[in-house]
Amino acid sequence: MILFTLVVVLFLVLLMIGYPVGFAAGLSSFIGAGLVFGGLFDIRASAMIARLALSSMDSFLLLAIPFFILAGRLMNFGGITERMFAFVALLVRPIRGGLGHANVMASVIFAGMSGSATADAVGLGQIEMKAMLSQGYQREFSAGVTAASSLIGPILPPSIALVAYSVQAEVSVARMFFAAIVPALMMAVVYMGYVAWRARKDGMPIGTRATMAEIWPAFRVAILPILTPFIIMGGIYTGIFTPTEAAAVAALYALCLGLFVYRAYGPTRLARELMGTLIDTAVIMVIIIFTSAFGVVMIRAGIPGALAEFFASLTSNATVLLFLMVVLWMVVGCFMAQTPAILILTPILMPIIKSYGIDPIQFGILMTLTLTLGLLTPPVGMVLYALTRVTGLSFRELVRVSVPYVWLTLGVIVILILLPGLITFLPDLLL
């Protein structure tokens, strides 16, 4: 057990010195597998890691990842996000602080296209920041709501993180997608509530009511991308296609919009986005391969059993256990990106939650949502690093303006722990 503790410590040290997550997990897995066979360079260790790597890739569900990445990239660079935000901004213009509400609403819509917080922050965030600053909104407030609203991306389906959890936990992707809808909308509601409070407190701008002559042209060019999440979830619900096939449909739909409807890019730009998708997919697959191997090595080392005994010594109550898990996830999220953390922690923690009788669907939503907070917390804070270029604020300033939204999100997490039916009732009703 001590030797395997050293393997975990090695993995954490490699992460802290900036080693890529996938390769840190791979090296740690190789060493751990060597310990299983009693020799660090035993050929059986290499064979074991190779088998684990191949088996982790042998999943039809994983095909959804490159397609969702491609759909998000095509939507982002096809001029589609600008049209969508312009339409939403018109609807909320007569509300005080309307562009803050538009920021959150646009992120909800865009989340139904890409499932990526970073894509939201970089692509849609540039449009939102430019619009808010031009209308006299404070830079700090605009940056805070832009950072927070991007958190909805990894939660609201389609979500790459939820696909990763479904693969590792062996649960239905469709159930995970439908279970995530209410929590994501709760996040949007509390963010907009905070925006409304700040708007009144700070006397933010209020615009004139948009005329039908303004709304109708904006609606015509925005309605097709806005329909994307409804096409995806509607197709899954009606059984027309599976979640994996839904990803391919989303990519094809985005391609048709960009090429034929809006004519936003040609073959050269399309080739660039395809290459970007290949690179992003390769990075994620390397992480999946080696983190899956790392998780199996930890299971063979008896880590889940040791953790189960530790948690059992603290509490026998499932609700209290979930609160303890939230603390664990928040610490992990500060040092590791969301998807790798899910891939590593899921196989280790699943035996524990089963022993407590916790619904794996509720558990997956809570873990994904809590780990998402790591996008706004140092030292990793990927969304904050991305927004330093977009907002013109320093990393420290972005951390400060994001604090209220972190507390609001924690409030949502507490409610979801105490009222698990908010997560499970929709998939139970529809599926």
Image (spheres, helix red, strand yellow):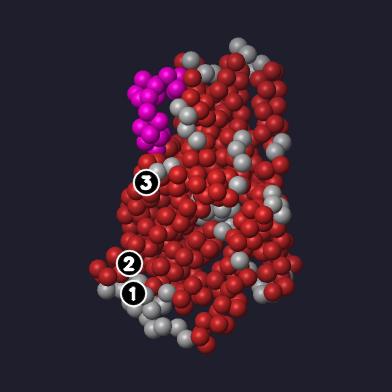
Q: Is residue 204 left or right of residue 22?
A: left
Taking the spot 51% from the left edge, 85% from the top edge, the residue there is 212
CA distance for labels 1 and 2: 7 Å
Q: Position of residue 148 (x, y in %)?
A: 41, 57
- Look at the numbered disc 1 and give the secondary structure of its residue: loop
Label 3 Cα neighbours within 10 Å, binned few <14 / some 14-19 / many ≥20: some
Q: Are marks 1 and 2 in contact (CB under 8 Å)?
A: yes
- Look at the numbered disc 2 and give the secondary structure of its residue: helix
Label 2 Cα neighbours within 10 Å, binned few <14 / some 14-19 / many ≥20: some
Q: Position of residue 14 (x, y in %)?
A: 50, 33
Taking the spot 59% from the left edge, 60% from the top edge, the residue there is 229
Taking the spot 35% from the left edge, 67% from the top edge, the residue there is 139
Q: Amino acid at mark 2?
A: Ala
Instruction: Point out which mark residue 96 bears.
Output: 1
Look at mark 3 in the image and give the residue it sits on.
415
Is the stretch drawn in magenta largely helix, strand or loop?
helix
Q: Locate residue 28: give its quadrant.
A: top right
Look at mark 2 in the image and give the residue it sits on.
196
Name the residue furthest right. 267
The segment highlighted magenta reads 306-326
Pick the front one: 27 or 159: 159
Question: Relative to 128, is 213 above or below?
Answer: below
Q: Position of residue 279 (x, y in %)?
A: 65, 50
